[in-house]
Amino acid sequence: MLDDAGSEAQVRPLLPSGPGCGVIITSRNRLAGLDGAALIDLGGLPAVASIELLAQIAGHERITIDLDAARHIVAQCGGLPVALRIAGARLASRRQWSARRLADRLAELLTSR
């Protein structure tokens, strides 16, 4: 399993060469230059599943108290499970933060790029 690969050049040296071997590679980029690769495009999680994942990590009460903020967090994370887990963990570790505060901070970060 190779997660979040940046390019074909990054993963080529890591690919097994023996028969019967397989590798799962995740990437935000299409790695179409890898011989024998089967490409599968996966989108983000649906909104309901994204909010549920965020709630499981950060706490259901904190998320359901401000579903609008939770929707903004989900949108800013693109429904990507890893991004939602990071956002949820950040919220869970900062008990004084509301979902709105996290949504606002994410918006600031994304607009400052």
Image (cartoon, grey):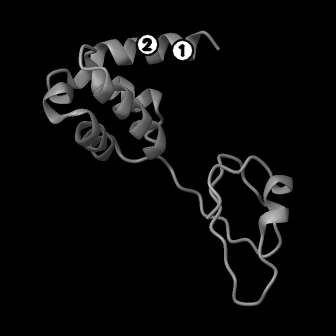
Instruction: Please name the residue that numbered disc 2 is placed on.
Output: 105
Quarter of the C terminus within the rendering? top right
Picture disc at residue 109? 1
Q: Is residue 97 above or below residue 91?
A: above
Q: Position of residue 50 (x, y in %)?
A: 33, 42
- Residue situated in front as seen by the camera: 63 or 45: 63
Residue 58 figure quarter: top left
Which residue is found at the position 43% from the left and 13% from the top? 105
| Disc 1 packing (10 Å; few <14; some 14–19; many ≥20) | few
Secondary structure category for the residue under label 2? helix
Quarter of the N terminus within the rendering? bottom right
- Residue situated in front as seen by the camera: 39 or 97: 97
The Cα–Cα distance between marks 2 and 1, rounded to whole angstroms, is 6 Å
Kind of residue indicated by mark 1: Leu
Query: Is residue 113 left or right of 100 when viewed as pictured?
Result: right
* Residue farthest to the bottom, as pictured: 19
- Residue situated in front as seen by the camera: 77 or 61: 61
Disc 2 and disc 1 in contact, CB within 8 angstroms: yes
Q: Position of residue 14 (x, y in %)?
A: 78, 65
Kind of residue indicated by mark 2: Arg
| Disc 2 packing (10 Å; few <14; some 14–19; many ≥20) | few
